[in-house]
């Protein structure tokens, strides 16, 4: 049984990258095993045995199997030494969980699928951008960014003075979103978020988990 954690998924995935960021920030060596959930016929059977919903990432450590990104990153923070990535006090921890919830439920689909995929990814694959989908996404994207900005306050991180799992959950989303030209005007009213993104984008963990 390997002592080194194993992460199953694809390097392009926002949620796989969030888990990789947590492992990297904790200084944990891990192995990334590629899984193509979009392969013809769907996810491979061995992956469905790890994750019955056929999503990524899945995770194993010392025989302990886990899926769902939030569960994985919390486990990584609590099971390994290194800098704490979760506040101990109830209120800051609740804020961290609130930001993660906002990203999962409201922001991810809008910022990534409705804006980044349609504006950046689709043309690269030879498909025209769905302009109506992008246009309809802009007000909701503005609401998501305003909500994150309001929670962030003076920062410098999303939930206060220390880096948390909320920042690592948000960073892969923003890495894609900010590649779309729509990001700049949407972020213009939120200089705090802009400074946050500049700070996060420059972290060594972001370079270490880049697809390039």
Image: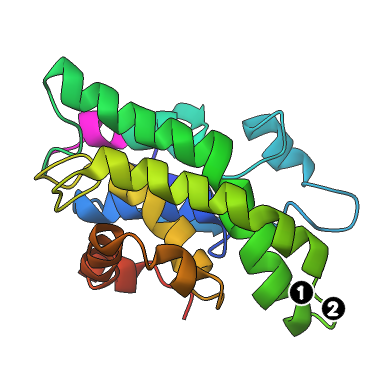
State the image quarter where residue 84 is shown.
top left
- Would you say residue 24 sits in the magenta stretch? no
Among the two numbered marks 2 and 1 on one chain, the one whose residue lies closer to the N terminus: 1
Residue range of the region highlighted in magenta in the rendering: 76-81
State the image quarter where residue 21 is shown.
bottom left
Q: Which residue is mark 1?
A: 122
The answer to whether 132 appears left or right of 138 in the picture is right
- Disc count in the image? 2
Which element type, helix, strand or loop, lies under badge 2? loop
One can see residue 74 in this view: yes
Q: Nearer the viewer, residue 141 or 118?
A: 141
Question: Are the residues flagged by discs 2 and 1 in contact, CB closer than 8 Å?
Answer: yes
Instruction: Give the farthest residue toward the right.
Output: 41
Task: Give the answer, above or below, for where 18 lies relative to 124.
Answer: above
Image quarter (top left, top right, bottom left or bottom right) of the N terminus: top left
- Would you say residue 77 sits in the magenta stretch? yes
Q: Which residue is mark 2?
A: 128
Q: Residue at x 32, y 59 (%)?
A: 190
Q: Residue at x 36, y 62 (%)?
A: 189
Instruction: Give the farthest residue toward the top.
Output: 90
Rendered location of residue 210, percent (x, y): 42, 72
- Cα distance in 3D space between marks 2 and 1: 6 Å
Crowding near the residue tagged with mark 2, few <14, some 14–19, many ≥20 C-alpha atoms within 10 Å: few
Q: Residue at x 47, y 41 (%)?
A: 103
Task: Give the answer, above or below, for where 183 lies relative to 52.
Answer: below
Rendered location of residue 37, percent (x, y): 73, 51
Crowding near the residue tagged with mark 1, few <14, some 14–19, many ≥20 C-alpha atoms within 10 Å: some
Task: Give the answer, above or below, for where 102 lies relative to 175.
Answer: above
Q: Main secondary structure of the magenta part?
A: helix
Q: Nearer the viewer, residue 145 or 208?
A: 145
Task: Give the answer, above or below, for where 11 lies relative to 145.
Answer: below
Colouring style:
rainbow
């Amino acid at each position: 049984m390997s002592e080194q954690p194993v992460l199953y998924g694809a390097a392009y995935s926002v949620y796989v990258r969030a888990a990789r960021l947590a492992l990297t920030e904790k200084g944990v060596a891990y192995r990334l095993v590629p899984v193509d959930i979009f392969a013809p016929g769907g996810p491979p059977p061995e992956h469905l045995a790890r994750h019955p919903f056929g999503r990524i990432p899945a995770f194993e450590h010392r025989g302990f199997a886990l899926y769902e990104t939030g569960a994985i990153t919390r486990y990584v923070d609590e099971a390994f030494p290194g800098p704490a990535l979760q506040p101990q006090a109830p209120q800051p921890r609740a804020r961290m969980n609130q930001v993660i919830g906002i990203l999962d439920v409201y922001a991810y689909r809008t910022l990534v699928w409705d804006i980044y995929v349609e504006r950046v990814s689709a043309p690269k694959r030879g498909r025209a951008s769905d302009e109506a989908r992008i246009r309809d996404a802009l007000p909701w994207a503005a609401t998501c960014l305003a909500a994150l900005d309001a929670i962030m306050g003076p920062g410098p991180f999303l939930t206060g003075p220390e880096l948390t799992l909320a920042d690592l959950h948000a960073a892969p989303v923003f890495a894609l979103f900010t590649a779309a030209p729509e990001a700049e005007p949407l972020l213009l009213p939120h200089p705090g978020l802009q400074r946050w993104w500049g700070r996060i984008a420059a972290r060594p963990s972001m370079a270490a988990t880049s697809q390039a």
